[in-house]
Image: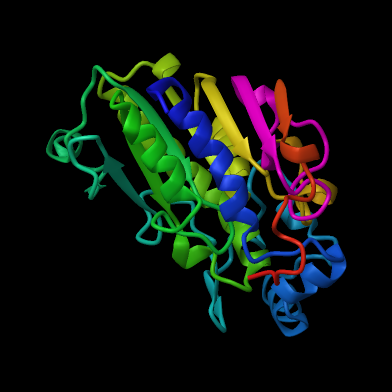
């Protein structure tokens, strides 16, 4: 495989990782398995959100009720803060010379230098989705595919503490803060000399929407976003344009669908949408349980 096809292969391989040991099943049953009733009730009680989750839909990130308190219930965390950086949102830099990764502190003027950042290379920011982390598939597939080219600085955003299974409702809300902090990373990179047209964002599941929501905090439109199965549950019904990935969020928005109509968005989201094997059911996934 040559370098020109390595990233494409990595983005395609995520389809199998994303759906490995999963079944499509009934969306209602899947969602109930992700959000136990007592978690839904508790989240509603604490935040006073309506059952329609209208508090999640506003482009501005919520009003006075939403900004009342940080809430921790069971394993779940609902962030009320809008201050970045945040201890639960971490950034890492990987290069072809340093595949172990370096923590990036956007408060330090030397963090990129010590991390091995090369201003002559292109930059990609990779953001995981629900119940993910930067060191789990499919993120590792995508990261390594970009690294194999040798001409990318690969940044990853890890917000694992804010998106733990089965806390989908809180994770959905927390995307607003993650997008704000990820936009700070983007500004930090471009502020150190990276060109916007050589910097793009790749997001999986809720991470795809985070890539789009970064635009709410940037004065210059992003050049390119690649969305990998942008998350569907609740977003398709209640998410406003400012709360989800749309083709207005970058000059080029590409979307890859492998689970459309179930956990992934079904509608055409980007300027170009790719539907792998029809975009819905993937070979080898039938009969495996959702995890």
Q: Residue at x 60, y 54 (%)?
A: 18
Q: Quadrant of the C terminus?
A: bottom right
Q: Nearer the viewer, residue 79 or 203?
A: 203
Q: Please state if 31 lies on the left or on the right of 105 as rendered.
A: right
- Looking at the rendered structure, the number of numbered marks drawn on it comes to 0
Q: Which residues are magenta?
A: 242-270
Q: Position of residue 245 (x, y in %)?
A: 67, 36
Q: Residue at x 77, y 56 (%)?
A: 233
Q: Position of residue 171 (x, y in %)?
A: 60, 61
Q: Which quarter of the figure has residue 187?
A: top left
Q: Nearer the viewer, residue 191 or 210?
A: 210
Q: Relative to 67, is 242 above or below?
A: above
- Residue 130 is covered by the magenta coloring: no
Q: Relative to 171, is 211 above or below?
A: above
Q: Relative to 234, is 21 above or below?
A: below
User: Taking the image as drawn, is residue 270 in sight?
Assistant: no
Q: Position of residue 34 (x, y in %)?
A: 70, 72
Q: Please state if 35 lies on the left or on the right of 2 as rendered.
A: right
Looking at the picture, the colour scheme in use is: rainbow
């Amino acid at each position: 495989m040559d370098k020109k096809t390595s990233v494409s292969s990595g983005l395609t391989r995520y389809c199998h990782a994303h759906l490995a040991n999963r079944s499509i099943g009934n969306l209602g049953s899947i969602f109930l398995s992700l959000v136990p009733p007592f978690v839904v009730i508790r989240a509603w009680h604490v935040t006073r959100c309506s059952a329609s989750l209208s508090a999640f839909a506003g482009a501005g990130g919520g009003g006075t009720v939403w900004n009342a308190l940080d809430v921790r219930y069971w394993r779940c965390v609902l962030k009320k803060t809008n201050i970045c950086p945040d201890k639960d949102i971490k950034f890492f830099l990987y290069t072809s010379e340093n595949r172990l990764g370096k923590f990036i502190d956007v408060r330090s003027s030397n963090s990129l230098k010590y991390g091995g950042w090369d201003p002559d290379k292109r930059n990609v920011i990779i953001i995981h989705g629900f119940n993910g982390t930067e060191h789990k598939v499919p993120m590792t597939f995508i990261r390594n595919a970009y690294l194999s080219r040798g001409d990318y600085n690969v940044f990853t955003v890890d917000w694992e503490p804010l998106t733990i299974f089965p806390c989908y409702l809180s994770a959905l809300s927390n995307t607003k803060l993650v997008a704000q902090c990820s936009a700070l990373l983007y500004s930090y990179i471009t502020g150190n000399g990276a060109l916007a047209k050589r910097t793009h964002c790749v997001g999986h599941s809720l991470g795809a929407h985070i890539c789009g929501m970064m635009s709410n905090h940037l004065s210059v439109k992003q050049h390119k976003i690649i969305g990998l199965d942008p998350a569907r549950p609740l977003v398709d019904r209640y998410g406003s344009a400012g709360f989800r990935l749309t083709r207005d969020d970058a000059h080029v928005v590409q979307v890859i669908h492998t689970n459309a109509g179930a956990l992934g968005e079904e509608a055409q989201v980007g300027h170009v949408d790719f539907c792998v094997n029809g975009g819905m059911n993937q070979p080898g996934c039938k009969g495996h349980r959702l995890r």
